[in-house]
Image (tube, grey):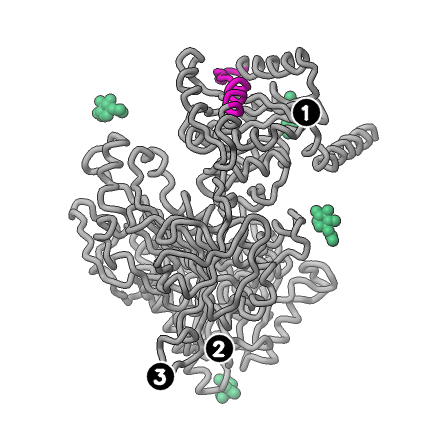
Amino acid sequence: MFATVLLLLVTLCAQGGNGKEEQEAQRLGHVSVVIVGGTGDLAKKYLWQGFFQLYTNQVSSGNTFSFYGGGLSPADQAIPVFFEILKGVSCNKDVPVERCALLKEQFLRLAQYRQLKTPEDYQDLAKHIEQQLKEEGMVEAGRLFYLSVPAFAYADIADKVNSSCRPASGVWLRVVLEKPFGHDFRSAQILASQLGNSLKDEEMYRIDHYLGKQVVSKILPFRIQNKKFLDPIWNKYHIERVEIVLKETLDAKGRIPFYDQYGVIRDVLQNHLTEVMTLLTMRLPVNQSSNEEVLRNKLKIFRSLQPLGKNQAVIGQYQAYNNEVQEELNKTKEYLSLTPTFAAVMAHIDMAQYDGVPVVLISGKKLDERVGYARVLFKNDIFCVQNHNSVHCKPKQVIFYFGHGSLQYPAILVTKNLFKPVVMDGEWKEVTEHKDVSVLGLPISDYYVQAPTVQREAYSELIAQIFSGRKDSFISAEHLLASWGLWTPLLDSLSSSYPRIYPGGADNANLLDFRLRGKEISYANEAVVIIAPDQMGGPSTDGFQVMQGKYRSADMVSAWTEELVERLAADVQAAAEAAVSEGGTFHLALSGGSTPLALFHRLALYHFSFPWRDTHVWMVDERCVPLTESESNFRNVHDHLLQHVRIPYYNIHPMPVQLNQRLCVEEDGGALLYEREVNKLVNGSSFHFVLLGVGYDGHTASLFPGGKVDGHGDSLVAFTESPAKPHQRMSLTLGAINRAHKVAVLVMGKGKHELITQLSRVKDNPDKWPVTGIRPANGRLVWYIDYDALLG
Ligand SMILES: *[C@@H]1O[C@H](CO)[C@@H](O)[C@H](O)[C@H]1NC(C)=O
Ligand SMILES: *[C@@H]1O[C@H](CO)[C@@H](O)[C@H](O)[C@H]1NC(C)=O
Ligand SMILES: *[C@@H]1O[C@H](CO)[C@@H](O)[C@H](O)[C@H]1NC(C)=O
Ligand SMILES: *[C@@H]1O[C@H](CO)[C@@H](O)[C@H](O)[C@H]1NC(C)=O
């Protein structure tokens, strides 16, 4: 009872705190700014400049400030370096020289260096702040900690801030963090939960500095203000493709210890380019000033992105990189780093609006020029019979130009054959005088161009937003995990791929050109890859052949994974064509789990002539969860196969595991219902093709060892129990499987080698090894086993 009341009180207080957030942001008083890592590179290049900018903008607002540069070095060593950095800050052009000198002098007087290493150092800092407030009779407004340190130090510092430097209640605390936020989904999750022990979510500001870039922050406003022009064309019928590009000329030298663990995908694509992608494609918020709605709409894009795999990426590495790694990481000459320094990834968004529109994210080091932009290229459906140079025959595009490159300044460009855009409010102007340059294939005079009147550094913009408590340009924990959820499977699948080696700069010529074909991306030119023979690992290239043989006295097909999957896909298609030509329909029963995913992708992406219109899809088994849950086998088949092919809805037969608003209750008769449907539609209740897998314990479908697998009598469908969660399942029985015309058992991966060896020796014993109960009465059983599983 008391516990409940207490809990309620705590909740109420917490909510009260949130509600005050807006007012707190405005509340006047003293603000302490602490840059942990205050003499580091980032602080030197951007952060102190950003805070000086903040100071000059706020100097007459009534707020007062102190600035602390924190570092691990003792004060006597660090102070000269620290003040050297601070002296480098500069004023906006419009500030008169004397005023600027005065502001700088004041800023320097308000700043001090402190060693921040031990818990005592943080306690001393807090004492110092409180003492100063008391001595000068100031009211405190807030404390801002900017952690400009390697990510591994975040949790520890956040803990020290929480235990010693939390201000009194009513005073805000904001802690700013920079990427990397983790290395993959799991590490990001761990980091988020560690930080969550010390800081509340609203206290954390995860920076992606790209979101502070002037053009990037105008993508949504541009889309909103030009809605009436964009609405009719912002869709699959008009967009040819979207490109988001960040090219660098620099290499990774000096940053290798960091870079080699991350590579270009984690460094740039997972964060900056992904953010831009969501801004370009998300649904426009109804209420522009609602952070929550913007974030919600961004998250929907993540949910709609099709999974990324090996075939959606090409990777490269500049030639000198490996030597740099050997040197900086002190490795031997044999050491080979596979870290990509170039990547192009093609994403697809599974929404009717963008169906089939490729979104290409490209970034690399040591390329021909330094430039960043996002381009939306439209289809041009005008066919020019004679005058090919007339403007309406030229490419139509909207370009968000982040900077550098041929144009040299940030701008938004719209080709004149599209529409004349509204000029952004607030410090933007139309540019009509320009040098004779061309931008992405068109002379600048073919565009309407608008640019900011004053160029601002991203960090200054973001620091101003942190100060005013605005969070829409920062990354929430949920959003971060969604992004890692997208990228982690791709990173895993690329972890042992060899990047294409490129010489760097103009010499790359067309070596990195790639081709988009359907849902896949590949390099356009064959490259001769030179790898010393002793560095060759894995399957040799002449091993790609399909082997036929016998396994457990049934037929077996074996090959390397990719060939095996293609062979199985071809066999399914052949069975489908035969069945359709004979009786007009093909009845296919599919398993869940991860093994058949490769087959589903193969069928969806390569087998365009598959007779889906005449195919009925049945389920071999189902878990007792709602069909919409990620654990559901049907959901799996739906997401990876059905939604990508043109199969009539009434040919799809999920198992009825949910009836009367409950899951798999015997008396609801779900199993019987499915059996009746099979009897009604499938001639002789004999499926043409049943696809099965086999588990480590020898289970197949949802028929588990010790589950009286043979005891289902004549029934075709039964409820079963799994030793793993969720325990309840619905499954075709051995009786149903053994009536089929063809049964395929697909087994892949080194992990199944033990099982395959064991199964080759045991006698039929369905109670112990359910898969051994498969003996089609009038049909054919074929094992499809990849070399990894067969040979270990
Ligand atoms: C901060 O530290 C206190 C103990 O000093 C702890 O009770 C609290 O849960 C910590 N975390 C947050 C988010 O306040
Ligand atoms: C829009 O969102 C802001 C911030 O959440 C809120 O204060 C405002 O009332 C909203 N406006 C409308 C029309 O809902
Ligand atoms: C580099 O490796 C050598 C030999 O393994 C070792 O003696 C040396 O201390 C290492 N240097 C650094 C900077 O790690
Ligand atoms: C149904 O199956 C029987 C027995 O295999 C076969 O003779 C008959 O032609 C089939 N009917 C159709 C419509 O396929």
Residues at circles 3 and 1 in contact by the CB criterion of under 8 Å: no
For image coordinates 67% across by 60% down, the residue present is 664
| Magenta stretch: includes residue 113 | yes
**Label 2 amino acid?**
Trp
Q: Nearer the viewer, mark 3 or mark 1?
A: 3
The numbered mark at residue 386 is 3
**Residue under label 2:** 612
**Magenta segment boundaries in residue numbering:** 102-119
Disc 1 residue: CB within 8 Å of ligand 1: no
Foreground: 79 or 57? 57
Quadrant in which the N terminus appears: top right
**Going from the N terminus, do you reach mark 3 or mark 1 first?**
1
What's under tag 1, amino acid-wise? Answer: Gly
Give the x, y percent position of residue 419.
52, 68
Task: Of the two numbered discs 2 and 3 on the same chain, state the one appearing first in sequence.
Answer: 3
Give the residue number, with chain letter if any, for mark 1: 29
Q: CA distance from mark 3 to mark 1?
A: 70 Å
> Is the residue 310 above or below the residue 600 in the image?
above
The residue at the point 42 percent across, 54 percent down is 373
Query: Is 591 part of what is drawn in magenta?
Result: no
